[in-house]
Amino acid sequence: MLRLALAALAATTAITTIQPTPVEAQDMQLPEGEVDRMMAMQMLALLAEDPETISSLGIIPPGGPDSPYARLTSQGAERFAQAQAMSRRFYEQASALDRASLPEDQQLSLDIWLAYLSASIAVDETGLNGSPYVVDQFWVQDLPRLFLRTHQLNSPFMAEAWVQRMEQVGDVVAEREALFEAEAARGVLPPQIIIDNVIADIDAVLEPAPDQHPMYLRLVADMPEDIAEDEAEALRARALAAITDGFYPAYRSMQDALRGHRDHARTENVGILGLPDGEEQYIALARRWTTTDIDPEAVHQRGLEEVARIRGEMDRRLTALGFTEGTFEERMAAAYQEGLYGYPNSEEGAEALLARTEQMVDDARRITEPYFTRFPEAPVETIPVPVSAQASAPNSYSRPAADGSRPGVFNINLADPSRYGDISYPSLVYHETIPGHHYQIALQQETDLPLVRRFLPFSAYSEGWGLYVETIAEDMGLYEENPIGVLGALSSELFRAARLVVDTGIHHQGWSREEAQEYMEETVGDPSVREVDRYIVWPGQALAYKTGQLVIADLRADAEERLGDDFDVALFHDEILREGSMPLSVLETQIGAWIAAQEAELAN
């Protein structure tokens, strides 16, 4: 289907003349509009071999021969090599365009696309396949998440495609295992504690019997009604056989491979510095995640400064709220206890928390309306993460499908509803839904922007926006009836500032896992064991949040200073989001030009 989509796009344009082939050194000139089509073709070509991402984005209609919705992404080394070669060819082709001859809008698209490709190429050139480790705790949940939530069961075709995908799991996981063995042979293994985590997570995934696994039960419960019963029964039988004879044995085999290498994995120097070329790899990964020309030491120091600033503000707020007795940690603990919702750790407590969350989202939509010029049409729903994933799955957001077949989803971990309260939970909801991720991502997808600006992922932009709206939630009135919730927002910001310190500490300064946990304990009052393990396997990603928020906040401060009383926060927010997700370096240029244009208009 994707190949047909590519052919259809090519047939409507002159794009067939600029397919990915070697290019000449001189600048290329294309008719107006063709540049965006070329980049769309390139992006779709990269996605052609990543069917799970297509399912997540929903940018290609289901159905047809060779549909991506009926395939899984190959996990073999050949696929990674092909994708890397394709990225290089596309970069050469796009960089050969005569940028100066393009309209400003297409210049922006080109800048964004080239930045995306160049960051990926820089990581590839350090010898990574996108991340340091072939297998980690996130990999364990990737396929279950696909079958539990991402793949829609809204038609007979999609039910058949679900089963076809499940029938491919054994081969795909075997490819992943072979790649893991190849990496192990050259000395690239996750730290021992990560291997232990993955082994335990696989046990959790495989704990239910195949016919009681949430994946199978989901297929049974959501089987489309317009499938004849005999056909539905055949699909259920095939699915159960694939889970029993493919999924379970493949995951057990991977578990055996991990056990076989566990004793050779390092227990010290757990950061990327423990790998060959680790220092160079960290710089490349950090720059890709932050979309800035990052200096790890400067980031570490900025993180320490932000931690001190935020803790000072939290101390002032604690005093104002009457929490004056004891140490900082004791006062925060007292505030946390006072702010708990009091829900029991039970099904009733989970249902109450879900209802409260839905009301919070509705209220946020209403209260924040004066701060924006438009809102997305796609709804956002709150859905519990599967019980099998509760041991390791964080609260998170999943974007809506572009075709409208799936809403945005706030995935909430209900392992213990009793732990939620006004300290931290409201800021989490605002970050993941409205006015955070759902607002920004759904709105971006619903625009008529070029494809690369609607769907390219730039974590520093999206996570920066999510944290930025957390920090201004009080100004927007979201805590007017919940003053203790401001402590939660500050606590969340403190957590992201601590990430700057810990990520660079682990991967730039060589901190141990225990040192990272101790710093988190001292700074945020929790050793954050799962979080630290996340930072270990995902170098640089934790920098995106605070880096993005700081850039947006600095841009707003500049606009407020230069525009004075004429500054309009709704227009500023619209400008931040108007052109879609982009590297922070490009965003700074865009907003700088917008501020200058506003000044010129005021002067006239």
Image: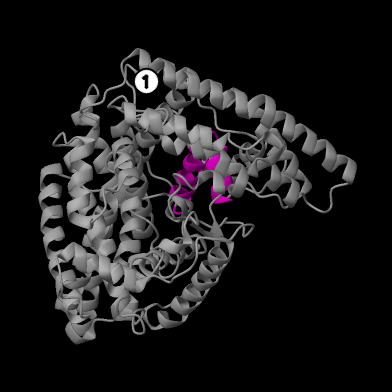
Which of the 4 quarters of the picture holds residue 371?
Answer: bottom left
Instruction: Give coordinates of residue 537: x percent, y percent.
Output: 33, 35
Q: Is residue 178 above or below residue 65?
A: above
Q: How many marks?
A: 1
Residue 42: within the magenta?
A: yes
Q: Amino acid at mark 1?
A: Arg
As drawn, is 288 to the left or to the right of 441? left
Q: Is residue 327 visible?
A: yes
Chief secondary structure of the magenta span?
A: helix
Residue 268: within the magenta?
A: no
Instruction: Give coordinates of residue 263: x percent, y percent.
Output: 34, 17
Q: Is residue 482 above or below residue 182?
A: below
Residue underneath mark 1: 262
Image quarter hosting the C terminus: bottom left
Q: Residue at x 19, y 34 (%)?
A: 512
Q: Residue at x 32, y 14 (%)?
A: 186
Q: Is residue 318 above or below residue 481?
A: above
Q: Which residues are magenta?
A: 32-58
6 or 149: nearer the eye? 149
As drawn, is 368 to the left or to the right of 468? right
Q: Is residue 293 visible?
A: no
Instruction: Give coordinates of residue 146: x percent, y percent.
Output: 58, 43
Q: How is the image coloured?
A: one colour
Instruction: Give coordinates of residue 17: x percent, y percent.
Output: 51, 36
Image quarter hosting the N terminus: top right
258 or 455: nearer the eye? 258
Describe the element under mark 1 as helix, strand or loop. Answer: helix
Q: Residue at x 39, y 69 (%)?
A: 421
As drawn, is 50 to the left or to the right of 466? right
